[in-house]
Amino acid sequence: MKNKSIYGGIGSVSAGTMRKEDLIPSFLWEANRLRLTKDERKAVRKIQSRANRADSDDAYWQDEVSDFDLEELFDILNAHSLPYFSFGAHEGDGADCGWWLSSCFAEEFDGLKVSDTAEVPRGYTGEVLHVSDHGNMTLYAYSRGRGREVWGVV
């Protein structure tokens, strides 16, 4: 349990398909890597059990139960998104599912934006977005002047 992450990664989890037979196993694998709540673990176990019993031409994959399972997995994975990220289909490719930076990130971010972390005021507490001259972004969480990296996008 202690090696599991609270948050999912950044980027694609499943690409090139929207078939439930492909998405559900990929999403289950990803969910099992996360530190889930008790209710989330229970839901994942139930979905895993149904998916394991189903073969490739099983009625489960055509049934609405698998639709509900897929929707629940989307919700669980989205609940484990990094700040300013969400889990879903990529805006430019609906068959590429994963964690993506919000398209409204620039409007949503209300913390301190700097081009050099030396610009962070001494004793600062809050979010700091470092944007390099190349456009790379790193989000830091600062507490009393000490920062820790939350995520970085190159």
Image (cartoon, rainbow, N blue to C red):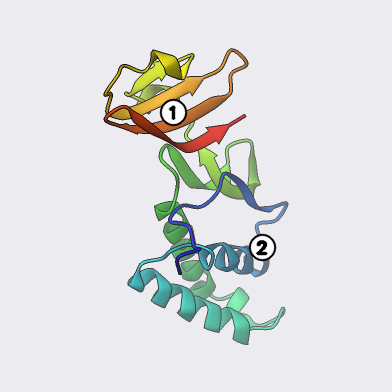
Q: Which residue is mark 2?
A: 19
**150 w.r.t. 104: above or below:** below
Rendered location of residue 126, percent (x, y): 29, 29
Quadrant location of the C terminus in the rendered image: top right
Amino acid type shown at disc 1: Phe
**148 w.r.t. 50: above or below:** above
Amino acid type shown at disc 2: Arg
Quadrant of the rendered image containing residue 57: bottom right
Q: Name the front one of labels 2 and 1.
A: 1
Tag 2 and tag 1, C-beta contact below 8 Å: no
Q: Which mark is on residue 13?
A: none
* Residue nearest the observer in this picture, 26 or 67: 26
Q: Residue at x 69, y 83 (%)?
A: 55
Q: Secondary structure at mark 1?
A: helix
Rendered location of residue 100, percent (x, y): 54, 40
Specify which label sits upstream in the sequence, 2 or 1. 2
Q: Which residue is mark 1?
A: 105
**43 w.r.t. 16: above or below:** below
Q: Residue at x 66, y 69 (%)?
A: 21
